[in-house]
Image: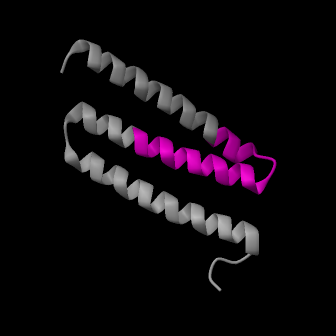
Amino acid sequence: MSPLLSNAITITLVAYGLAMLLALWRMLRGPAAQDRVLALDLIYIIGMLIALVIGLRYSSHTYFEAALLIALFGFVSSAAMGKFLLRGEVIE
């Protein structure tokens, strides 16, 4: 791997880590439940992006499969939380 790509991956991971910390702060401090759900969505998206960047760094397909699973579970949890916020129940 070239030094330029290695440095870019390192900077990207640091930026994603900072973004995840800011989203975690919003999730803990959010004034409304909608803010907390949105911050949780952002956290799982950033987690998926981190898995993808690490997969690029180590040239491993396992990280890409993990990112796919994170996206799948994140979508299902977002739909469940949205339904809970609208109706007050997840399962009818």
What secondary structure is the magenta-colored segment mainly? helix
Q: Position of residue 91 (x, y in %)?
A: 62, 82
Whether residue 53 sits left or right of residue 57 in the image: it is: right
Give 84 or 30, whichever is nearer the viewer: 84
Rendered location of residue 79, percent (x, y): 58, 65
Q: Is residue 25 magenta?
A: yes
Residue 26, placed above or below residue 57: below
Q: Which residue is found at the position 63% from the left and 34% from the top?
A: 22
74 relative to 53, above or below: below
* In front of the other: 21 or 74: 74
Left-right relation of 44 to 85: left
Residue at the bottom extreme of this rendering = 92
Residue 81 relative to residue 46: left or right: right
Q: Position of residue 39 (x, y in %)?
A: 64, 46
Quick one: quadrant of the C terminus? bottom right
What kind of colouring is applied to the model shown? one colour
Residue drawn where x is 35% and y is 19% of the image: 8
Location of the N terminus (image quadrant): top left
- The question of residue 71 being in magenta is answered with no
The image quadrant that residue 49 belongs to is top left
Q: Residue at x 67, y 39 (%)?
A: 25
Residue positioned most to the right:
31
> Total of numbered circles in the picture?
0
- Picture quadrant of residue 53: top left
Magenta segment boundaries in residue numbering: 24-49
Q: Position of residue 55 (x, y in %)?
A: 27, 39
In this view, 77 is above or below 25:
below
Does 19 sit left or right of 32 as displayed? left
